[in-house]
Image (cartoon, rainbow, N blue to C red):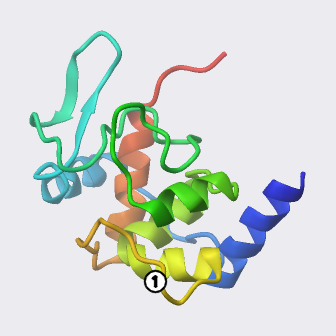
């Protein structure tokens, strides 16, 4: 419960949840800018989006996942620390993070020296929200 409150406080500190209607189809197009570093591959080994990129982690199942926890991927220390502090990828946190990863981590961790390894920034909030909707459309089915 405390972790959830901390995460929500961080989200509200960064701004309210995106109020735009997200579009998964537009997100699929926006993913073209992500596929240089990221891929979406399901557990069966099927590539759902992207190429065989390995600079960034596989984004399959990112929705609802604790930050910095893809097995075998070497995350930056600050993203791992944010995950340990309770950061879970939901729409608000994902959208804020991809628009400026280092700024997000500085604010989330309360550490002006925090930085993300991801240097790319999604310029438009609508594109970031659409990317999230696209990743939701590829997410594993839940019961």
On the image, the x and y values in percent for residue 15 come to 62, 82
Please, what secondary structure does the residue beneath circle 1 have? helix
**Is 92 positioned to the left or the right of 52 in the image?**
right
Kindly identify the residue that appears in the image at 41 percent across and 35 percent down.
137
Instruction: Say few, some or many: other residues with alpha carbon within 10 Å of mark 1 (under 14 / 14 to 19 / 20 or more).
Output: some
Q: On screen, 110 above or below 7?
A: below
Count of numbered tags: 1
Residue 65 is drawn in which quadrant?
A: top right
Q: On screen, 125 above or below 21?
A: below
On the image, the x and y values in percent for residue 72 come to 35, 32
Q: Is residue 21 visible?
A: no
* Residue projecting furthest to the top: 44
**Is 140 positioned to the left or the right of 66 in the image?**
left
Q: In front: 59, or 85?
A: 85
Q: On screen, 109 above or below 58?
A: below
Kindly identify the residue that appears in the image at 21 percent across and 58 percent down.
30
* Residue projecting furthest to the bottom: 112
């Amino acid at each position: 419960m405390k972790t959830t409150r901390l995460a929500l406080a961080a989200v509200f500190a960064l701004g309210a949840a995106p109020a735009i209607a997200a579009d998964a189809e537009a997100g699929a197009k926006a993913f073209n800018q992500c596929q240089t570093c990221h891929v979406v591959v399901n557990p069966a080994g099927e590539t759902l989006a992207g190429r065989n990129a390995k600079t960034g982690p596989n984004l399959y199942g990112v929705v609802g996942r604790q930050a910095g926890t893809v097995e075998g991927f070497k995350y930056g220390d600050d993203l791992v620390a944010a995950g340990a502090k309770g950061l879970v990828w939901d729409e608000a946190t994902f959208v804020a993070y991809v628009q400026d990863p280092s700024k997000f981590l500085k604010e989330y961790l309360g550490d002006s020296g925090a930085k993300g390894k991801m240097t790319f920034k999604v310029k438009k909030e609508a594109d970031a929200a659409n990317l999230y909707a696209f990743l939701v459309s590829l997410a594993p089915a839940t019961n």
